[in-house]
Image (cartoon, rainbow, N blue to C red):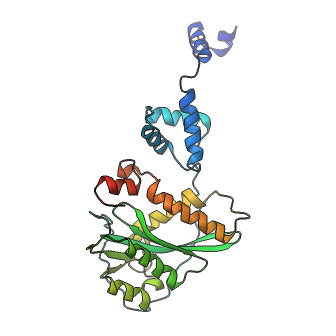
Amino acid sequence: EITAFLRISRSSYEYWRARLSRPDKYAALRGRVRELFEEGGRNWGYRTIWARLRREGRRASEKVVRRLMREEGLEVVYNRRRRRGWSSYEGEVSAAPPNLVARDFSAAAPDELWVTDVTEFRVPAGKVYLSAVVDCYDGRPAGWRIGPRPTASLANGSLLDALAARREGARTVVHSDRGGHYRWPGWIAICGEHGLARSMSAKGCSPDNAACEGFFGRLKNEFFHYRDWEGVSLAEFSERLDAYLRYYCSGRIKRSLGWLSPDEYRRSEGWAA
């Protein structure tokens, strides 16, 4: 009667009944997948979970990990809403240097090409701004400053932090958009003093600084969006953001780096990190 009602054969019914009664051979793996998903702040997709399992010596195919995550309802949800963001453009306050990058963000060694920008975070307690300098060699943030206002000292400070760790003898291009921070005398003086070649995007052309825009996009997807920041002070938010950026350097593994973090990748390539 059951098989007739379900319109399946008796053999199919017996096959699936036997399978359902078997113990779950992925029980241990399933549990670890859930743990890793939570450890990653519910931001790691199946490929990253698979890579982290391999680092632990656990063998499973990407297909199995993806199926287990689907069965457990472990879904990464990124915020795709778009709104007009904050802009640092203040007009043509000084002559713009040429675009030396031309959207080629590849670099053969650390500290050859840096990209930089300032981004805004809006939380219930107010606004926080991040100025970051990103190394195109491996996507590692080379320097950053966090503050309540997008001041010149914020941008200058992030550049000075990057310079403090720059390898000796490096010839560095620093690329930015046309924001006022990168056209004021302080920024220009720092670049001149340390032998940095300045490069700038075309006016209003975000693809010209796509490497930095992409960095901010990943950061906000993984750290900021779909988080409840109610009751979090600006000081606490800044501390959490700083901790995430340190994790980005040493703990966040990337497929493009052979599933290593930027610091691990540099060590594997013979660069001190």
Along the line of sight, which residue is nearer the eye, 262 or 105? 262
Image x and y of residue 209, in percent: 40, 71
Residue 107 picture quarter: bottom left
Along the line of sight, which residue is nearer the eye, 197 or 240? 240
Q: Residue at x 43, y 41 (%)?
A: 55
Viewport quadrant of the N terminus: top right
Q: Residue at x 27, y 75 (%)?
A: 171
Image x and y of residue 83, in percent: 59, 69
Number of disc labels: 0
Image x and y of residue 172, in percent: 30, 74
Is residue 203 depicted above or below 78 in this figure?
A: below
Viewport quadrant of the C terminus: bottom left
Query: Is 270 positioned to the left or the right of 8 in the image?
Result: left
Image x and y of residue 183, in percent: 42, 87
Q: Residue at x 47, y 38 (%)?
A: 53
Residue 113 picture quarter: bottom left
Q: Residue at x 30, y 63 (%)?
A: 106
Along the line of sight, which residue is nearer the eye, 22 or 273? 273
Residue 190 picture quarter: bottom left
In the rendered image, is residue 129 in sight? Answer: yes
In the rendered image, is residue 80 in sight? Answer: no
Along the line of sight, which residue is nearer the eye, 255 or 73? 255
